[in-house]
Amino acid sequence: MTFVVEVRFKGNRKGYFSWPADDPTSLHLDDPVIVEVERGQDCGRVSALGDSAVKKCGRCNACSLGEAAASVASRVVRRATAGDLRTEAELRRTEDDVRRKVRDRVRDHALPMKVSDAEWQWDRRKLTIYFTAEQRVDFRALVRDLAGLFRTRIELRQIGARDEAKRLDGIGRCGRQLCIASWLPEGRPVSLSLAKDQGLSLNPTQISGPCGRLLCCLHYEHDFYVEQRKRFPKEGKVVRTANGLERVLAVDIFRERVTLRAEDGSTSVVSLDHLKI
């Protein structure tokens, strides 16, 4: 039996690891830990334990065996020491300089890509470079160049605009932390039809986030709008009221009001309950 632990790393990256089931209470949320990864060790912080971690592991679909604790092959090696945390902090401080050097090499190779972030593995056996690009990029020569510069294994990982926002974090137009970087598990595709269903402007500049893509919140609020609108008559429909036949101009699902236009051109606002009487 194994005890499943979710561990988060820099940029909201996460992984699932095993911990001996006979010692589950020795780990707590936000504890720093050293974990076993491919070709070495990394340092992160515990973000979920036990049943909660198992459920999240089953949803991530990162491996073909993700439904049970037994599927977690890598393990938590130990809790991180003060020395381990100093090593991690030093690596984080050097990553801005690493990113600048990588950008310089990208320009030298004239590659159509934007370097978003750089992340050292805790044991310095791997350096991951995250980038965005409009098309596929042949970066083989760049990898060889960077491997010679940093004397370690180089991994270049292309990510999308939403993934970049998740890694770099930021503040949305609502004034709060980006959903994709705080609680939203993954960035799902968002279409203009969602904005249309919610009666919002169809101008992409007005309904886009800092990443330049349509707001993530359009997706998880959509079901609410669809269900609420079922209670209202559709815009343009002619309904019979105490004043005769009137056309529905607009509906306000939050205040539960309907704007009507009579045959003489006058308009009125009535409550939904009044309209149904």
Image: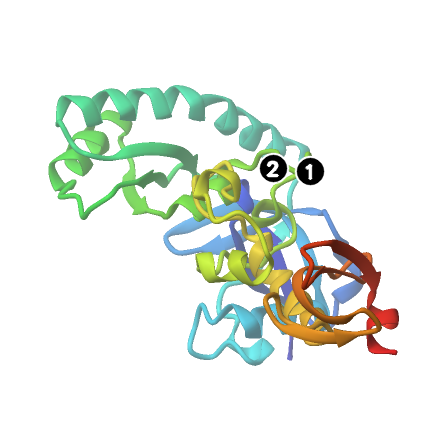
Q: Where in the figure is residue 126, as x and y percent of width and height? A: 35, 41
Q: What numbered label is drawn on residue 172?
A: 2
Say if residue 182 shows up in the picture: yes
Q: Does residue 252 appear to the left or right of 218 in the view shown? A: right
Q: Marks 2 and 1, Cα distance to the nearest angstrom? A: 6 Å
What kind of residue is marked 1? Arg
Q: Residue 102 carries which label?
A: none
At a point 34% along the width and 20% down the height, the residue shown is 100
Quadrant in which the C terminus appears:
bottom right
Answer yes or no: is residue 190 visible.
no
Q: Is mark 2 on a helix, strand or loop?
A: loop
The amino acid marked with disc number 2 is Gly
Q: Is residue 186 left or right of residue 269?
A: left
Which quadrant of the figure contains the N terminus?
Answer: bottom right
**Residue density around tag 2, few if under 14, some if 14–19, many if 20 or more, within 10 Å:** some
Give how far across and how far down residue 90 sits, in percent.
53, 24
Give neighbour class at mark 1: few <14, some 14-19, many 20+ (Cα, 10 Å): few
Specify the quadrant of the image occupied by residue 69.
Answer: bottom right
* Residue drawn where x is 68% and y is 34% of the image: 175
Please give the name of the residue rendered at 17% of the width and 34% of the height, measured from the top-left corner: 142
The residue indicated by pointer 1 is 176
Give me the residue at 56% from left, 75% from top: 58
Above/below status of 219 relative to 243:
above
Disc 1, SS: loop
Left or right of residue 180, residue 252 in this image: right
- Where residue 134 appears, as percent x and y from the top left, is 24, 43
The front one of 129 and 247 is: 247
Display coloring: rainbow
Task: Look at the numbered discs 2 and 1 and tell me whether their residues touch, using CB distance below 8 Å.
Answer: yes
Residue 163 percent across, percent down from the top left: 44, 47
Q: Is 115 in front, or is 29?
A: 115
